Amino acid sequence: MKDVDLIVIGAGAAGLMCAGTAAGFGKSVLVLDHAEKAGKKILISGGGRCNFTNRFAGPANFISANPHFCKSALARFSAADFISWVEQNGIAYHEREHGQLFCDESARDILDMLLQPCHEFGSRFMLNTEIHGVEKHASFVVKTDKGDFSAASVAIATGGLSIPKMGASAFGLRVAEAFGLNVIEANPGLVPFTFTGKEKERLQTLAGISLDVTVSNRGTAFTEAMLFTHRGLSGPAMLQISSYWQPGDSLCINLLPACDVRALLAEKSQQRPDAQLATALSEILPKRLVQLLFDADLRELRLKQLNHRQLEQVLETLQGWSLKPNGTEGYRTAEVTTGGVDTNELSSKTMQSNKVPGLYFIGEVVDVTGHLGGFNFQWAWSSGYAAGMAI
Ligand code: FDA
């Protein structure tokens, strides 16, 4: 006995994509969510304008224990497919740097677009519904505070752990574990770094300064803006690298990635040999940063006085500044969660569990995490579509 063909748990980006797709193919669909409204993260994303995809989205923009896993779903429903759907709906959008696409008006346009096929093809929504568990008998039974519901298939689309106050929960990971699926340790991703003690006090003096840097960690590097905050380091460069960072790691920061500093200092030294190092550096970096990086003894040296060892020290500091965060701001502010349901447990074509036929995992709950810039929504669309087509 089954009530519906498909129960989708989680009315977020991936869940709505899956529900609308399956309903469009004639499946009866029930969408359950404990939140009072669907798509809450979509509505607040991109400062209310939703960075809904990235024109250049490809497998290289995703982090996963198996970097090949995302390829099939991304090919079946690509950024270009989502963009053409947006265009068919007459939603005005614009492109920002690095191929990021945002709505001109409001993220609400994207949510309405996702809800449209759900409503047109009769998906039923039950919001404000606490889910107690998922069981498999002849069909799946989802137990809730509003009764039990059965379905031939269940898609878990409960997202990651980021922003618990918006309803994020570990529900999807617990369901995976309960069915014997392996889960890769979850961690906050796309999240600012924090510092403690003396280092925090030192960095606080720079709060508000933003500059383009190249930050590297564990063999990965990003060149984008870094922002000093009252708590530590933020800005796109830091958010990006945070998804790779492990506690205890030091970050290596090139403060002048677009500059041949050695040649520049040689030129300045020739033109103005009596200029102080601090004066020369303050022409290319914020003065407060120069003061923090170098002791007065070095700062006050005239360019002509710099010996080889001192020059190398200056270059090393500017191009390989090492900082060791004590942690991150955690799930409270993280934009995503790294880790999740092990992709070895799932079909890359359909997102169905290999061990439990009929059970699907889509979106952020899966161990596929996008870089900053619209990639996480693209994964939600691609994985939601893959499952919705297959069910
Ligand atoms: P999503 O979080 O969208 O949905 C999960 C749903 O499951 C929610 O409706 C939740 O209420 C429900 N749920 C959770 N636990 C449950 C339970 N126990 N019982 C019932 N329901 C439950 N990405 C991007 O590409 N571009 C962007 O501009 C942004 N901007 C952005 C801003 C902010 C502030 C955040 C926090 C995140 C972003 N992101 C983003 C990331 C993006 O929002 C995220 O990756 C996707 O929403 C993931 O889609 P999912 O459907 O997997 O989860």
Image: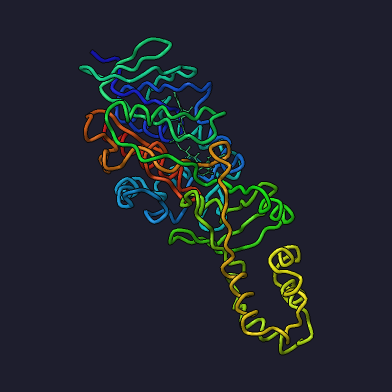
The residue under the point 36% across, 36% down is: 362
Out of 19 and 194, give the one closest to the viewer. Answer: 194
Is residue 84 visible to the viewer in this orientation of the structure? no
In which quadrant will I find the N terminus?
Answer: top left
Q: Quadrant of residue 385?
A: top left
Q: Is residue 204 above or below residue 381?
A: below
> Which quadrant holds residue 381?
top left
Does any portion of residue 177 appear in the rendered image? yes
Along the line of sight, which residue is nearer the eye, 102 or 131?
131
Q: Position of residue 267 (x, y in %)?
A: 68, 86
Task: Using the image, determine if residue 217 lies above or below residue 88.
Answer: below
Q: Quadrant of residue 319?
A: bottom right
Residue 290's x, y, as percent? 72, 67
- Eyeballing the image, is 267 above or below 70? below
Residue 242, x across and y down, in percent: 51, 50
User: How many marks overall?
Assistant: 0
